[in-house]
Image: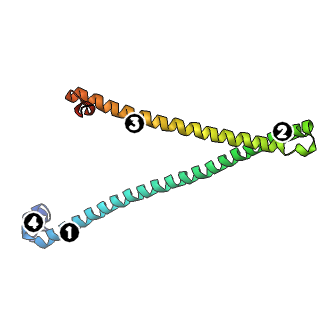
Amino acid sequence: MNPQSSHSPGNGGRFADESPADHPPEAFKEALKLVGEAKEYASYLVSAKIDGYISTAKRIGFYAGLGVVSAAIGLTVVVVSVYMLLSGLAGGLSHLAVYLFGERWAWLGPMVLGLLVVGMVFAGAFIGIKWLLNHMRVQTVAKYEERKRKQRSQFGHDVGQRAGR
């Protein structure tokens, strides 16, 4: 073998006595290969991240659907139970009306119970709305009173005092 050959065992391996500048085409090919490899690894990472997000979104969608179905079943059970309860109460009141006033008064039980239920729903809604509006007003007043307290501690006066009130 030729002692100057790059493949001779005495020179330490491939291009050992030559600089990479002596073989730019090979160096360029190696750089392109490394860039391609890095590009593939980056693409792999991005693809894995996207697939993870898609998997999470699918899982969220599944549990949301399961929650909707469960809520529908639960609501159905509650509605049927309330219907059965109110139907029984209306029947009992109807029998009481028949016992007290005669057969022509059988309609009185369901009507009285219906009026009571509707009245309680409206009263509950009225009280709830009134409480909610008052609660929101109290929170807003407290928020601005706290801001004015901070203004007094920071500036020595608050917006109301500064305006001359």
**Taking 149 as reference, is 120 left or right?**
right
Sequence-wise first label, 2 or 1: 1
Sequence-wise first label, 3 or 2: 2
Check if mark 2's residue and mark 1's residue have beta carbons within 8 Å. Answer: no
Mark 4 surroundings: few (<14), some (14-19) or many (≥20) residues within 10 A: few
Give the image quarter of residue 163.
top left
What amino acid is labelled 2 in the image? Leu
Q: CA distance from mark 4 to mark 3?
A: 74 Å
Q: CA distance from mark 2 to mark 1?
A: 90 Å
What amino acid is labelled 3 in the image? Thr
Q: Which residue is painted at 9% across and 66% down in the image?
A: 20
Determine whether the residue tagged by mark 3 lies in a helix, strand or loop. Answer: helix
Mark 2 surroundings: few (<14), some (14-19) or many (≥20) residues within 10 A: many
Tag 1 residue: 32
Check if mark 1's residue and mark 3's residue have beta carbons within 8 Å. Answer: no
Sequence-wise first label, 1 or 3: 1
Q: Which residue is painted at 83% across and 38% down in the image?
A: 93
Tag 4 residue: 20
Sequence-wise first label, 4 or 3: 4
What amino acid is labelled 1 in the image? Leu
Q: Nearest the camera: 165 or 24?
A: 165
Tag 2 residue: 93
Q: How many marks?
A: 4
Tag 3 residue: 140
